[in-house]
Amino acid sequence: MAKDLTIREIIKILKEEGHMVEFYERKDGGILIKSIDGVKYQGATGNKVGRWMTGQSISQKRATQLQKITTTGKRAKKTITDNEVKKALQRTQKVWNKAFPHKRGEKPDVGLKTAKQVKWNLEHKGKEETLRLLKESERYARGLAYHEGIKDFVEQLQHWNEQRKNPSVTQLISDIIKRQDKIRFEWLWDAYATAYKLNDPIYSTEEVVRQIRNNLHLDEE
């Protein structure tokens, strides 16, 4: 279970899943997560978000979804013969180049966006999974949350609501699924931090749900 993991182990898992994590070690040896994917947290909030994000997938977490950045090579690009994959790679690279121009420094160390990565994924994971990862990488560059991250969040809410059967949470889950293509990274991580309150009885479920809806901009046109 996630509660048995150390923060250092949680950080390792998040990085393996493609997230960017910044943290610092206090003089007493404690570790505090400062930011996840560029979203900054104060105090112990980052640790809580990290625990929430890894809570349900530790024992059966899938293989790393987003390979680390490698050098793009012309030779690797020539060996990709599938036109659909080639076009998806070109589209993803175009979005990344626009979002992270060279003059602003190196591109983030996350996401499937080079020919070598695509070639490796085609050989080891197949076309369907490669296309999915390219789409997710494109979403990252556009500032949109990964579908897998949204799915994990929804599953956490469903798990929490199995015993309580709260209609406001049921409606929240339905609305998140409907608007998942529009949910941005920073919105989702704010929602993670807010949802942690569902584990504390001092907070009203309806109030926490209202805050999550605000975090995710679910009631905006």
Image (cartoon, grey):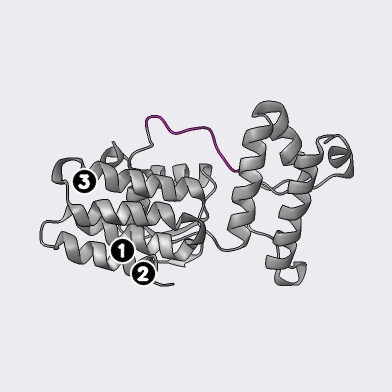
Quadrant (top left/top right/bottom left/bottom right) for the N terminus: top left
Query: Residue at (37%, 49%) from the top-left corner?
Result: 153
Which residue appears at 14% of the width and 46% of the height?
164
- As drawn, the label of residue 219 is 2
Q: Amino acid at mark 1?
A: Ile
Residue occupying image coordinates x 75% and y 54%? 91
| Residue range corresponding to the magenta coloring | 59-67
Give the alpha-carbon distance from disc 3 to disc 2, as whole Å.
Answer: 21 Å
Tally of numbered tags:
3
Point out the tag, 1 or 2, that comes first from the N-terminus. Answer: 1
Q: Magenta residues: mostly which secondary structure? A: loop
Residue 210: % across, % down: 25, 67
User: How far is mark 3 from mark 1, CA to CA?
Assistant: 15 Å
Dot 1: element: helix
Earlier residue among tags 3 and 2:
3
Question: In this orientation, does residue 214 appear?
Answer: yes
Report whether 112 appears left or right of 9.
right
Q: Is residue 60 above or below residue 26?
A: above
The numbered dot on residue 212 is 1
Q: Which residue is mark 3?
A: 161
